[in-house]
Image (spheres, rainbow, N blue to C red):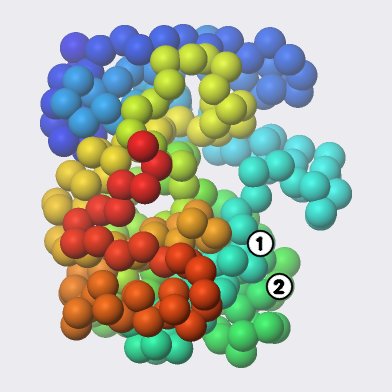
Amino acid sequence: MSNCIICGGLTRYFFSKEYTTEPYASFMHKLGTVEYRQCQHCGFVLSATHAQANHHDWQELNALHHNYVETHFGCDNIPNQPPYLEQASMLALLKGHGLISMQSGVDFAGGYGRLSGILHQYFALELPVYDPFVQNKNGQVNYLEHLAPHGMDLVVNSAMFEHIRCREDLDQINRVVADSGALVLHTVICENIPNDPHWFYLDPPVHSAFHTNKSMSVLMEQWGYVASIYSVKAKSWCLLKQDLDDGERAIAKINEELQQPFFIYKKGFVDYWK
């Protein structure tokens, strides 16, 4: 038995997966068959195989995977890409209504800076990029050179929560958020993780962690977030360390303007995917 990195509950064997098709079979040659463990309290699932891999093998796997994705697929058909335009619209709307601040902000693990580029080009908003593994093609700041003394007003994190291997990987993101700031994250979060090695979210061999509504609620409380906003179209959550003044009314006003339920607001975690 081992303990969950989210809530400390006991974990047990969930299932195993072997990558048998190329190029992932070759990418996973050093790691071999992957064993997933599930927390019996919050349902969080972590790959014990990825967690125990040495740093060099983990870096090599990420480099192989991301290089393959960038070179094998055209820019318009890369699989499982975040909805960058919708994310940019989400940020612009929340900022425009004064619900978040972007006076200081960073796209943490922002890869090649695609979201930052869209924000700059189409919304006249600046969001520097930090990514320790990817060289930013857009030539923007790719490190936390100008980190605000007390953290950032806004930290965006797209598609990294499923790549973590230990609690420190998560905590390093939250530490960048100011005490009154907001964390916007994009990942798959559902009520229950399927007990199925063929689940689509396991396809990329660099996906090592899978979050549930309960595990995210626990994490939010541990980190001091009090409310959240979810955008279905952006498939992203905005976690707030300071609640909005009459949050439901503020979000309802935006939805009324857009004539669609673009946002969902809730004290605690918006457990949209049941």
Identified by mark 1, the residue type is Tyr
**Which residue appears at 34% of the width and 28% of the height?**
192
Task: Answer with the quarter of the image where residue 153 lies.
Answer: bottom left
* Image location of residue 227, percent across then percent down: 22, 64
Q: Are marks 1 and 2 in contact (CB under 8 Å)?
A: yes
Task: Answer with the quarter of the image where residue 36 lies.
Answer: top left
* Image location of residue 165, percent across then percent down: 38, 35
Judged from the image, the secondary structure of the residue bearing numbered disc 1 is loop
**Which residue appears at 20% of the width and 79% of the height?**
246
The residues tagged by marks 1 and 2 sit, at their Cα atoms, a distance apart of 7 Å
| Circle 2 residues within 10 Å: few <14, some 14–19, many ≥20 | few
Residue 198 lies left or right of residue 145; in this view the side is: right
Task: Answer with the quarter of the image where residue 224 lies.
Answer: bottom left
Q: Quadrant of the C terminus?
A: top left
The answer, for residue 105, to whether it is visible in the render is: no
The answer, for residue 272, to whether it is visible in the render is: yes
* Image location of residue 160, percent across then percent down: 47, 48
| Viewer-proximal residue among 165 and 40 | 40
In the image, residue 245 sits, relative to residue 58, either above or below, namely below
Residue 72 lies left or right of residue 202; in this view the side is: right
* Image location of residue 90, percent across then percent down: 50, 72
Q: Return the mark for residue 112.
A: 1
Judged from the image, the secondary structure of the residue bearing numbered disc 2 is loop
Q: Quadrant of the N terminus?
A: top left
| Viewer-proximal residue among 145 and 219 | 219
**Which residue appears at 39% of the width and 42% of the height?**
273
Q: Return the mark for residue 138.
A: 2
**Which residue appears at 35% of the width and 88% of the height?**
98
| Viewer-proximal residue among 190 and 34 | 190
